[in-house]
Amino acid sequence: MTAPTRIGAYRVERLLGTGSFATVWLAYDPVLDGRVAIKVLAENWSHDLRVRERFLDEARLLRRLDHDRLVRVHAVGELPDGRPYAVLAWADGGSLRDRLARAPLAAAEAVTLLDEIAAGVAVLHRHGVVHRDLAPGNILFRSGSGAERVLIADLGLAKALAAASGLTARAGTPGYMAPEQDDPLAVVDTRADVFGLGRLGLRLLGDGPVRGGTREDGRAGSELPRLRAGVPPGLATVLRTATAARPADRYPDATAFQAALRHAASGPSAGPASGPSAPPGSGPSAPPTSGPFATPGSGDAAPLGSGHAAAAATGPPGGAAVRPPRRRRLATSGAVAVVLVALAAAAGDAAGRPSTGAVGRSGPLTVALPAGWRADGTGWAGQYGDDGELEPALVVSPDPGRWAADPDVPGAFVGLSAGTARRTTPEGFLAERPHADCAAAPVRHTRQGGVDWVVAAFACPGGRPLIVEAAGRAGGPAGLLYVQLTPPPGSGEDFVDALLAGVRVR
């Protein structure tokens, strides 16, 4: 990887970390005379409008919340090649994953840290946001005036509760992910984060391996580990309740978890504690009036005061913004109807004419190109087949290189995935791909090119006014076909259907 010398107005100093979706660089801000972390969307994801939306939504969400328990966002921008980036406060103390790799924390420090993490997650829950990936790599530390602040980072998998559709994508780090996040039909809410907090507690306070499959795959097991010497014995019950397999048996949110944690931590310390024995679902205890966590006000504990400088970590990008209030939703839904009526009225115009015979190819996937359009790309970023190679995909557009970054350029992403077809249905796949700030029109079904397509249209308040998502099963064992389309201005449903009719699997 070639290091850039500058990103916008910032002078790049070194690489901090890379992930599947983004790269993070340490840079110098000449205006503020300080260092910042710049998170840049990975090039192989820049064509995917949904990933771009989630990347920018994360930055907007953090900017809107602007809380000292969350990583702060200074600015957003775009590279010359169209990839978006976010300028973040630099977490100079590194991550919890870094610290645990060096040595376990003392029991008292670990309990205090878990309380700090819960306080940060409670900020998200008060604003109707679920993080969904509370793992050690997403807990960062930033030095301050004589104290160290614990920060919650990487809301790339966060989802606003108000925008939850009840159909959610699998998301999270194995070992910390709630069991319901494996179920595409489950509603993921604040209790998924309570599970993550419980798993962090087991990682921080457990003594020995977790039996019953809990630690390695994220599912609740029948047995939890013994807690280390010096851990108050009541914490065993708290962690068992937090990591219950059924969401209904857990604490309702991070505030309730923190209250139970503080109550248990105010009890006497013990020697090596036995595994939890109380049944889950007993509910949170009241906060203590004395003890190490008895603090007035909102329940935020004092910051920690130790740590070492280290590079900040990075992870998946994205995030979903809170759904607009009901009045706005109704107004936007009306906009969907207006857009679709306009599309129907415009059907059959020049933009909807069939292709001129040019075809784009990627493996067995072919796409008949509309007049004036070209094809680019040979694989679906992040989707691998049984042979370990990228599954076939193409970007088709009058200008494929500009399509993802420029909302004025129409185009489409077309992909074929055998693995996705084994995992879900076309309807289920589209349900995993919402556009949270957009209003959805009723889903329609159409048969084009021998494929039964499920088509969803989204009218959006900014950027591209209309985004179309379509999925269908190719014949035989080929897999699931997916199309994400931004039609040309003035085109109608005929254009969408003509493009779908030109998608073939050889």
Image: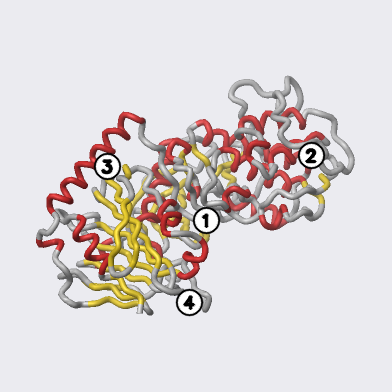
Disc 4 element: loop
Disc 3 element: loop
Given the image, on which type of amino acid does mark 3 rest?
Pro
In percent of width and height, residue 158 lies at 49, 45
- In primary-sequence order, the first of circles 3 and 2 is 2
> What residue is rendered at 42% in x and 55% in y?
427
Reading the image, the residue beneath label 4 is 389
Reading the image, the residue beneath label 3 is 461
Describe residue 402's horizontal placement relative to residue 219 as left or right: left
- In primary-sequence order, the first of circles 4 and 1 is 1
Of 408 and 328, which appears nearest the observer? 328
Given the image, on which type of amino acid does mark 4 rest?
Glu
Disc 2 element: helix
Describe residue 102's horizontal placement relative to residue 323 as left or right: right
The CA span between labels 3 and 1 is 30 Å
The CA span between labels 1 and 2 is 31 Å
Reading the image, the residue beneath label 2 is 236
Describe residue 399's horizontal placement relative to residue 156 as left or right: left
The CA span between labels 3 and 2 is 48 Å
Given the image, on which type of amino acid does mark 2 rest?
Ala
> What residue is rendered at 74% in x and 37% in y?
280
Q: Are marks 4 and 2 in contact (CB under 8 Å)?
A: no
